[in-house]
Amino acid sequence: MNKKALIIVDVQNDFCPGGSLPVPQGNEVVGPLNRMVEYAKSHGWLIVASRDWHPAVTSHFETYGGMWPVHCVLDTKGAEFHRDLEVDDVTIVSKATEPDEDGYSAFDGHTKDGQALGTFLKSHGVEELYVGGLATDYCVKATALDSVKYGFRTFLLSDAIRGVDRESGDSDHAIGEMKQAGVSVITTREVWHGKT
Ligand code: VGL
């Protein structure tokens, strides 16, 4: 059987309503992702949660030449995972930790032991990756595209993602790009029903 992994991308307070860079309805990914975590645990999958973990001064932020308001600064409330997200016993991957790094892709991140995500997944024999979280048009897209590049069979969990949509249609466009690259789009319900 192919070894599978779930990757939960950036479900952090600052990307949820009330945060500094809120993704519309970003909190709605928590329910389906928690159900996926439960499913993944009972089926022996690896589970990873990525987090944006920026230094206070980074060229990623508007104030320092980037395009985003200050968000997900390491060790702040805004950088914490959404309080209802079930991340106990999950491997955390921190990304965008350097002052000159956008770090959209979870594959730019490292475990607490400093292992790059791709190396970590391969060392556990993972072949299939299921991606959900925030935001569809940035970090989810970058992660899913890298996943394909790294050779993983890649699934996008369509009901467990939400987008920023700086321009309307950005998320739809991102999903198109992911499909084009070979990502399969699937609902969490289809996963539970063994449609893969
Ligand atoms: C993200 C915008 C800026 C994301 C991160 O997690 O998708 N979006 N930084």
Image (tube, rainbow, N blue to C red):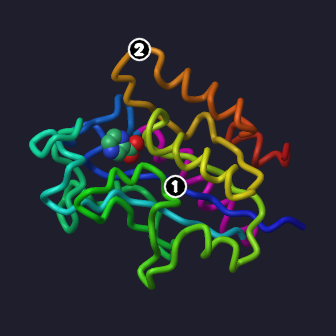
For mark 1, what is the residue?
Answer: 8
Find out if the beta carbon at label 2 lies less than 8 Å from the nearest ligand 1 atom.
no
* Residue 193, picture quadrant: top right
* Residue 145, picture quadrant: top right
Find out if the beta carbon at label 1 lies less than 8 Å from the nearest ligand 1 atom.
no
Q: Is residue 59 above or below residue 65?
A: below
Relative to 167, is 89 on the left or the right? right
Q: Is residue 170 above or below residue 114?
A: above
Residue 31 among those drawn in magenta:
yes
Look at discs 1 and 2 and give the one toward the viewer.
2
SS at mark 1 in the image: strand
Q: Residues within 10 Å of mark 1 (few under 14, many from 20)?
A: many
SS at mark 2 in the image: loop
Q: Please identify the residue farthest to the bottom as the structure is shown.
A: 113
Relative to 161, is 158 on the left or the right? right
For mark 2, what is the residue?
Answer: 168
* Residue positioned 68% across, 52% down in the render: 149
Q: Which circle marks residue 18 in the picture? A: none
Instruction: Identify residue type, mark 2.
Output: Ser
Instruction: Identify residue type, mark 1.
Output: Ile
Q: Please identify the residue farthest to the left as the structure is shown.
A: 63
- Where is residue 184 shown, x and y percent of the image? 75, 38
- Where is residue 81 shown, x and y percent of the image? 34, 58
- In the foreground, 160 or 130: 130
Relative to 62, is 33 on the left or the right? right
Ligand 1 sits in quadrant: top left
- Where is residue 87 shown, x and y percent of the image? 46, 66
- In the foreground, 5 or 18: 5
Q: Is residue 186 visible?
A: no
* Residue positioned 75% across, 57% down in the render: 151
Give the magenta part as a residue range. 28-44
